[in-house]
Amino acid sequence: MSGRLTTHVLDTARGCPAAGVKIALYRLSGHSHRRIAETATNADGRTDAPLLSGAALKAGVYELVFFAGDYLRANGAGAEILFLDQIPIRFGVSDPAQHYHVPLLLSPWAYSTYRGS
């Protein structure tokens, strides 16, 4: 089985998947920060396809940026300046043959992540 990178976003304050969250994926190398993918979550809070899979997933350092502020404003967090807006999660891929799942659990005041399955 070839490796892949996936994600999903759950709105823990509302108790539901976070649909419509824009996500950008970057590959980091030295001082280079290059965007390699952009997508948004579907009604289930997931992306329609893996962010990377097969030969496109290489060992290295990546960063997912979740545009949480847009989602939070659209769902009732009416503040002009939010506590959380763009949420970057930087992580490493050491074995590109594995599945790397990087979920985001989100509320207007906190977030968490972990390496899922």
Image (tube, grey):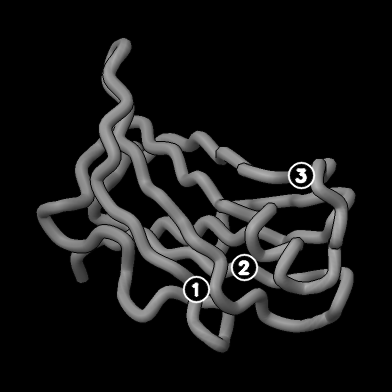
Q: Which residue is mark 1?
A: 41
Element marked by disc 2:
strand
Q: CA distance from mark 1 to mark 3?
A: 18 Å
Q: Are marks 2 and 1 in contact (CB under 8 Å)?
A: yes
Taking depth in this image into account, of 33 and 53 the one nearest to the observer is: 33
Position of 69 with respect to 50 (left or right) is: right
Farthest-out residue, left: 55
Vertical position of residue 95 compared to residue 61: above or below: below
Taking depth in this image into account, of 108 and 75 the one nearest to the observer is: 75
Disc nearer the start of the sequence (2/3): 2
| Residue kind at label 1, given as amino acid type | Thr
Element marked by disc 1:
loop
| Residue kind at label 2, given as amino acid type | Val
Element marked by disc 3:
loop
Farthest-out residue, top: 31
Q: Which residue is mark 3?
A: 84
Disc 2 residue crowd, few under 14, some 14–19, many 20+, Cα 10 Å: many
Position of 88 with respect to 73 (left or right) is: left
Taking depth in this image into account, of 92 and 26 the one nearest to the observer is: 26
Q: Position of residue 30 (x, y in %)?
A: 29, 12
Taking depth in this image into account, of 46 and 92 the one nearest to the observer is: 46
Disc 3 residue crowd, few under 14, some 14–19, many 20+, Cα 10 Å: some
**Residue located at (49% from left, 82% from top):** 42
Q: Position of residue 17 (x, y in %)?
A: 67, 80
Quadrant containing the N terminus is bottom left
Q: Is residue 117 visible?
A: no
| Residue kind at label 3, given as amino acid type | Leu
| Picture quadrant where residue 53 is located | bottom left
Q: Closer to the camera: disc 2 or disc 1?
A: 1
Q: How many marks?
A: 3
Position of 69 with respect to 66 (left or right) is: right
Q: CA distance from mark 2 to mark 3?
A: 14 Å
